[in-house]
Amino acid sequence: MRFFVFIFLSLLFPLVLCAQEATSSAGGNISGKGGSVSYTLGQVSYTSISVSNITFGEGVQQAFDKISGIIPSDAPSSDLTIDCIVFPNPTTNYVTLTVKNANFKDLKYLLYDTGKNLIKQEDIQTASTVVSMVDLPTGTYLLTVMNPKKNILRIFKIIKDYIQQ
């Protein structure tokens, strides 16, 4: 009988120990009369693997941004038809800025850190431009697309992550 109890507990015990661990930017516990809740915000570590046209995301929280960029309220209405996307985001080494439905040769991008310090700027020469972030530390950056009149057309929030070893 002890043998069967031992086997039963041995099979049941690993099910109790299943859990996930994540490094997050914020979190805490809230207690009240009705009970308590633990919460976590913003997973810092995120890894994605791309194969052909499919991207697999690892991690507790998955990044999903349906908006392809912020359109500033003071952008000229004729420029609102510009279609830009930035991928992969979050990234570890680089992002690709793709411009559609516009004369990309008249545009430029500017990369800022969250302290509004300009890190780099370049003219957009092709429909797909690779922006290197290899030498930048982990953090959040803003990629701004501007026209020759210095009107901001799109602003993208980019998360630079590190590679977990």
Image (cartoon, helix red, strand yellow):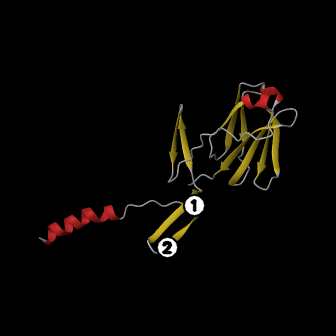
Q: Quadrant of the C terminus?
A: bottom right
From the top left corner, tell me how far across and down residue 101 is, in percent: 71, 24
Q: Secondary structure at mark 2?
A: strand
Query: Closer to the camera, 134 or 23?
Result: 23
81 vs 86: above or below: above
Q: Amino acid at mark 2?
A: Ser
How busy is the neighbourhood of tag 1: few (under 14 within 10 Å), some, or many (20 plus)? some
Query: Closer to the camera, 29 or 21?
Result: 29
From the top left corner, tell me how far across and down residue 24 is, in percent: 57, 61
Task: Identify the residue at image location x=59%, y=40%.
Answer: 66
Task: Identify the residue at image location x=86%, y=37%.
Answer: 150
From the top left corner, tell me how far across and down residue 21 is, in percent: 48, 61
Q: Amino acid at mark 1?
A: Ser
65 vs 81: above or below: below
Residue carrying label 1: 24
Q: Is residue 15 left or right of residue 145?
A: left
Q: Secondary structure at mark 1?
A: strand
Task: Identify the residue at image location x=54%, y=41%.
Answer: 49
**Residue 102 falls in image quadrant:** top right
Is tag 2's residue or tag 1's residue first in the polypeptide sequence? 1
Residue carrying label 2: 31
How busy is the neighbourhood of tag 2: few (under 14 within 10 Å), some, or many (20 plus)? few
Task: Identify the residue at image location x=15%, y=72%.
Answer: 2
